[in-house]
Image (cartoon, grey):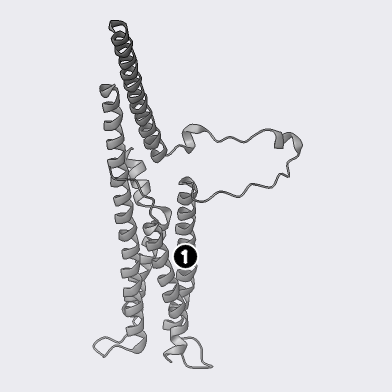
């Protein structure tokens, strides 16, 4: 049976793409001065204004994209149980701290959990069947042994 | 798993932002011609070359990010579906053995 593996490749793919675009956006801001098509001390030419007006939003949006992929990756790691969320500071008083915050079971249970619980139930049933079979076999052997003694 | 749930797993919010960056790449690449900072019929200016190259990088990288995420997410979905099917088969076989 092929096991279900948790992979972060997809998140890394998105984060790397965002980082490359962030760097390219930074280059777009610097390019008019680095390539020299913006004269020093003069008013900004149209191309410089366009590069600035495009480069800054691109860098910001790429950063947002990076953090979105990072948040998705962290959420998946938490859902898989590889990361444990930090306990929140109890500032709301004793009364609220006494009430345990339990998540709704239906909301938190992922497909993987359902699959694992089904598999665990199947394995438990199989184990019970094997135990029953072995106990029956032992009972038969002891009965046979007693019968042989009586015959002697 | 419903189709909308599967689509949500294939296209996360980050992919929408990457698509926005893909559109921005198109603008960056064509902006010298739209804004007529590149004279028609002449060799490309350094600014034009820079904008076309950077715009192409935006487009290729953004599209690669979207498609790469989608492929990896699809692989994970298929693995999960296979594991679920095998678990269901195992669960249905266990009472029969008993």
Residue sitting at 41 percent across and 90 percent down? A35
Q: Residue furthest left?
A: B41
- The C terminus of chain A appears in which quarter of the rendering? top left
In the depicted structure, whether residue A96 falls above or below residue A39: above
Q: Residue furthest front?
A: A152
Q: Nearer the viewer, residue A149 or A42?
A: A149
Residue A70 pos. (x, y %): 47, 58
Disc 1 marks which residue? Answer: A61
Residue B60 pos. (x, y %): 31, 69
In what element is the residue under mark 1? helix
User: What chain is tagged by disc 1?
Assistant: A
Image label count: 1
Query: Residue B17 is drawn in which quadrant?
Result: bottom left
In the depicted structure, whether residue A62 falls above or below residue B1: below
In the depicted structure, whether residue B50 falls above or below residue A134: below
Q: Nearer the viewer, residue A96 or B4?
A: A96
Residue sitting at 69 percent across and 47 percent down? A89
Q: Residues within 10 Å of mark 1 (few under 14, many from 20)?
A: many
In the depicted structure, whether residue A142 falls above or below residue A129: above
Q: Nearer the viewer, residue B51 or A49?
A: B51
Residue A139 pos. (x, y %): 34, 15
């Amino acid at each position: 049976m092929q096991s279900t593996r948790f992979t972060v490749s997809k998140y890394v793919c998105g984060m790397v793409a965002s980082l490359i675009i962030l760097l390219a956006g930074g280059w777009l801001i610097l390019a008019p001065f680095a390539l020299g098509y913006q004269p020093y001390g003069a008013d900004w030419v149209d191309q410089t204004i366009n590069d600035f007006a495009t480069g800054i939003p691109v860098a910001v949006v790429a950063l947002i994209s990076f953090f979105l992929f990072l948040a998705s990756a962290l959420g998946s790691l938490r859902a898989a149980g590889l990361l444990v969320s930090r306990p929140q500071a109890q500032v709301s008083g004793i009364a609220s701290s006494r009430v345990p915050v339990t998540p709704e079971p239906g909301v938190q249970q992922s497909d993987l959990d359902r699959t694992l619980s089904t598999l665990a139930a199947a394995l438990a049933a199989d184990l019970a069947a094997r135990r029953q079979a072995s106990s029956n076999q032992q009972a038969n052997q002891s009965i046979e042994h007693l019968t042989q003694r009586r015959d002697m | 798993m419903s189709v909308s749930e599967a689509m949500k797993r294939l296209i996360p919010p980050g992919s929408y932002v990457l698509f926005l960056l893909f559109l921005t790449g198109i603008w960056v690449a064509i902006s010298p011609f739209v804004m007529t900072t590149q004279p028609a019929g002449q060799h490309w200016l350094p600014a034009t070359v820079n904008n076309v190259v950077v715009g192409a990088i935006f487009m290729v990288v953004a599209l690669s990010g979207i498609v790469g995420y989608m492929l990896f997410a699809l692989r994970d979905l298929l693995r999960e579906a296979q594991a679920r099917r095998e678990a269901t088969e195992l669960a249905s076989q266990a009472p029969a053995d008993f």
